[in-house]
Amino acid sequence: MRVLVTGGTGYIGSTAVEILLTQGFEISILDDCSMGHADTVPAGVRFVNGSLLNVSEVADALTGCDAVMHFAGKSLVGESVEKPDLYHSVNVDGTRILLDQMREQLITKIVFSSSAATYGEPKVVPILETSETIPTNPYGATKLAIDHMITAEAAAHGISAASLRYFNVAGALKAKRGWLAERHNPETHLIPNVLRSTTDNPVKIFGTDWPTHDGTCIRDYVHVIDLIDAHLKALQSLGKPGHEIYNLGSGSGYSVREVVAAASAATGQQIPFIDSPRRAGDPAVLIADISKAKSKLAWEPSRDMNTMVSDTLKSMA
Ligand code: UFG
């Protein structure tokens, strides 16, 4: 089976490529490398260095594929507030082109990278797939618009689809050619920032007055290898027309201070930090209810916070 991995040179997409290859899949990649890195593309993979917004490049990338894992897209919450048009164009319009071209080529299976950002500020945690979706930023709004588009596509044209709503993805994978890890510039995510913290440039803790047990935000972290394992299981579940949505997290939460403590334990040194004002747009607590993925996909994450932190640390060595 040949899978098109859009966004296959990014942090999560490149990890998917690596794991799919080890499982015997053939791979094509479509990526414009605006966020990813062409040096992650392994030998033997078909690489189309192109854009989701270019119909002929999308059609070319899809040629000969049986299914799609759709990771490509803009994914920074803050940037989406400043450039909502860009987010709508790349994420929503780009996915429209991808779905149209899949239909042209009779490709009916897609696993889509959705986000917990579709839910917005939750009224109840843990969050179920049936919880209200009121995104608080354009990034989340585009992911929700795509989820709706895929539901309509499945109803109208019989595709078989799964949207995977990621909570906080962390960790890294060691491939033969080196570590596949977060390489963002600027880096906004907590764990890489904590591990890069120095006395001269300490990591900022965004908000210490949240309504949580230690005053800092709580998030649900899932290791990128476990996350891709869920993608494989979701792909294997496809066949019948329809669209299923699954939350992917661990089902439990860590506060920002607890992440700093885990990183201090992993490095054997107290990580320097500085208490700072809240970051705009952050919800206090995001924790996934993952019972649907557990029961319907037989998926369960097995890597804990210590593994996520220590794998990220090793990838930075
Ligand atoms: N944080 C800090 N200091 C930092 C970075 C982050 O205190 O230097 C805090 C944040 O305020 C937040 C927590 O650490 O409370 C996690 O922040 P991240 O930026 O690592 O992740 P987010 O929870 O903001 O975002 C993630 C994904 C988004 C997705 C969102 C869904 O990165 O793509 O989850 O809610 F939209």
Image (tube, rainbow, N blue to C red):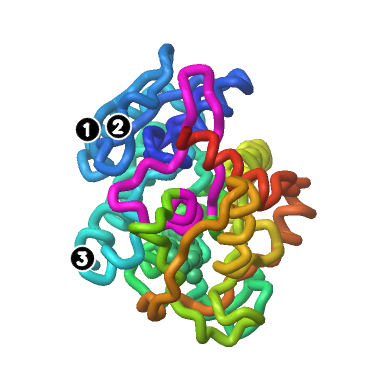
> Residue 186 colored magenta?
yes
Residue bounds of the magenta highlight: 169-195
Check if mark 1's residue and mark 2's residue have beta carbons within 8 Å: yes
> In the rendered structure, which amino acid carries the disc numbered 1?
Ser
For numbered disc 3, what is the local secondary structure? Answer: loop
Circle 1 packing at 10 Å, graded few (<14), some (14-19), many (20+), is some
Please indicate whether residue 65 sits to the left or right of residue 258 in the image: left
**Chain-order first, disc 3 or disc 2:** 2
The percent position of residue 225, horizontal first and vertical second, equals 61, 39
The answer to whether residue 165 of the structure is visible from this angle is no
Name the residue rendered at 59%, 54% in the picture. 264
For numbered disc 2, what is the local secondary structure? Answer: helix
Mark 3 highlights which residue?
83
> In the rendered structure, which amino acid carries the disc numbered 2?
Ala
Q: Nearer the viewer, mark 3 or mark 1?
A: 3
Name the residue rendered at 79%, 54% in the picture. 295
Q: In this view, does 290 lie above or below 5?
A: below
The percent position of residue 244, horizontal first and vertical second, equals 61, 56
Q: Nearer the viewer, residue 96 or 298?
A: 298
Name the residue rendered at 23%, 57% in the picture. 89
> In the rendered structure, which amino acid carries the disc numbered 3?
Lys
Alpha carbon separation for disc pair 1 and 2: 5 Å
